[in-house]
């Protein structure tokens, strides 16, 4: 089972939102109290006044800082590039997900690590 499979299983018990292509999911500076798991579609994350960006796809999570930072403010913008379905998880739901499926935490860390490595590679080139 991978992160996307786990998120799909959690979606049956969680809050899933449909987001239309072009819609803004959150903006830089806004308060945040949840993270999002991308079930379907493509999302663009941008920061530094859109000077840098990253495109993520189904199976990835974004906005995770909201779960670990008190009085969190979003660092960048998230916009749906295509029609999307996202699993919305606040801290309580995330902790429940990790308790129900401990591998979920490892899968998410792996996904975030891979994205960070890709971003570092882009900076080097």
Image (cartoon, rainbow, N blue to C red):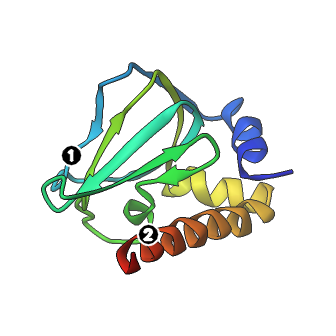
Mark 1 neighbour class, 10 Å CA radius: few under 14, some 14 to 19, many 20 or more: some
> Does residue 54 sit above or below 26 in this rendering?
below
Residue 56 in sight from this viewpoint: yes
> Does residue 119 sit above or below 73 in this rendering?
below
Q: Nearer the viewer, residue 16 or 125?
A: 125
Label 2–label 1 contact, CB within 8 A: no
Residue 36 in sight from this viewpoint: no
Q: Nearer the viewer, residue 3 or 97?
A: 3
At a point 69% along the width and 43% down the height, the residue shown is 7
Label 1, secondary structure: give it: loop
Residue 123, given in percent of the width and then of the height, sits at 36, 75
Residue 17, given in percent of the width and then of the height, sits at 48, 26
- How many marks on residues? 2
Label 2, secondary structure: give it: helix
Dot placed on the residue nearer the N-terminal end, 2 or 1: 1
At a point 40% along the width and 55% down the height, the residue shown is 63
At a point 63% along the width and 70% down the height, the residue shown is 109
Q: Nearer the viewer, residue 23 or 29?
A: 23
| Residue at the limit of the structure toward the front, as seen here | 125
Horizontal side of 78 relative to 100 (left or right) equals left
Quadrant of the snapshot with the C terminus: bottom left
Mark 2 neighbour class, 10 Å CA radius: few under 14, some 14 to 19, many 20 or more: some
User: Residue at label 2?
Assistant: 119
| Residue at the limit of the structure toward the right, as seen here | 1
Residue 11, given in percent of the width and then of the height, sits at 67, 34
Q: CA distance from mark 2 to mark 1?
A: 20 Å
User: Residue at label 1?
Assistant: 27
Residue 120, given in percent of the width and then of the height, sits at 44, 77
């Amino acid at each position: 089972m991978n992160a996307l499979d786990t998120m799909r299983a959690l979606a049956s018990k969680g809050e899933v939102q449909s987001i239309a292509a072009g819609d803004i999911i959150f903006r830089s500076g806004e308060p945040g109290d949840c993270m999002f798991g991308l079930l379907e579609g493509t999302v663009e994350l941008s920061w530094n006044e859109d000077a840098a960006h990253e495109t993520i796809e189904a199976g990835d999570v974004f906005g995770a800082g909201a779960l670990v930072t008190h009085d969190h403010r979003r660092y960048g913008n998230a916009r749906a590039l295509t029609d999307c379905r996202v699993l919305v998880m606040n801290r309580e739901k995330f902790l429940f997900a990790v308790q129900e499926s401990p591998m979920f935490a490892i899968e998410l860390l792996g996904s975030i690590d891979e994205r960070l490595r890709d971003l570092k590679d882009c900076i080097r080139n």
